[in-house]
Image: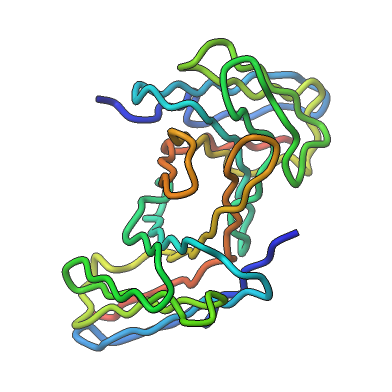
Amino acid sequence: GQQLNQSPQSMFIQEGEDVSMNCTSSSIFNTWLWYKQDPGEGPVLLIALYKAGELTSNGRLTAQFGITRKDSFLNISASIPSDVGIYFCAGPFSGAGSYQLTFGKGTKLSVIP
Amino acid sequence: NAGVTQTPKFQVLKTGQSMTLQCAQDMNHNSMYWYRQDPGMGLRLIYYSASEGTTDKGEVPNGYNVSRLNKREFSLRLESAAPSQTSVYFCGSTRGGPQETQYFGPGTRLLVL
């Protein structure tokens, strides 16, 4: 099936630093989604990308849809303690009349105050 | 709008016991999904329902059954729980198109002893 590879698996950063993480696939995706999961909660959508080359921002978050449609990047600027959590990339693919999501394994972010 | 709700939040079972996890959404979404999340893994799809009256297997369906009771509700049943089913279970929903983002419930934490 579809597989998404996220890196890094985890990162420890100092408050105020910028963060960069990425997601790659051997298959082409027409949509890339980035979710954040806070401890003990369900994933929440941060940014959705629908077009190759698209660069989209949401506050301190910026995500890009790679030109090859096989990768995407998420950057967080000036990190703060509430950025702690697991960040997942996801891509939809069609199957049996519905669109399913395949998820990466996540990047666990820890922010040191 | 409550979004996607799940009950119970926590459950402890003994091996061989059965239980049903409940999920409901109030967004008039067509498609609903059940995932499990294990440590260090992304979300893996168990079953999904593209629309009311239809269900299909996902990546890891063994040991589970589902029922799409109506448009709002999608339940997941463990007939004979096993320790390997210890996990966090998330329900998701979406209207159904390729650019539709998926929304998630808060999760059910299940421990099978």
Residue A106 vs A8, above or below: the answer is above
Residue B36 picture quarter: top right
Q: Position of residue B4 (x, y in %)?
A: 39, 30
Residue A26 picture quarter: bottom right
Q: How many marks?
A: 0
Image point (38%, 22%), residue name: B28
Image point (51%, 17%), residue name: B73
Nearer the observer, B83 or B59: B59
**Quadrant the N terminus of chain A occupies:** bottom right
* Left or right: residue B100 compared with residue B77: left
Q: Position of residue B104 (x, y in %)?
A: 43, 40
**Quadrant the C terminus of chain A occupies:** bottom left
Nearer the observer, A101 or B16: A101
* Left or right: residue B46 compared with residue A71: right
Image point (79%, 20%), residue name: B79
Q: Position of residue B64 (x, y in %)?
A: 76, 29
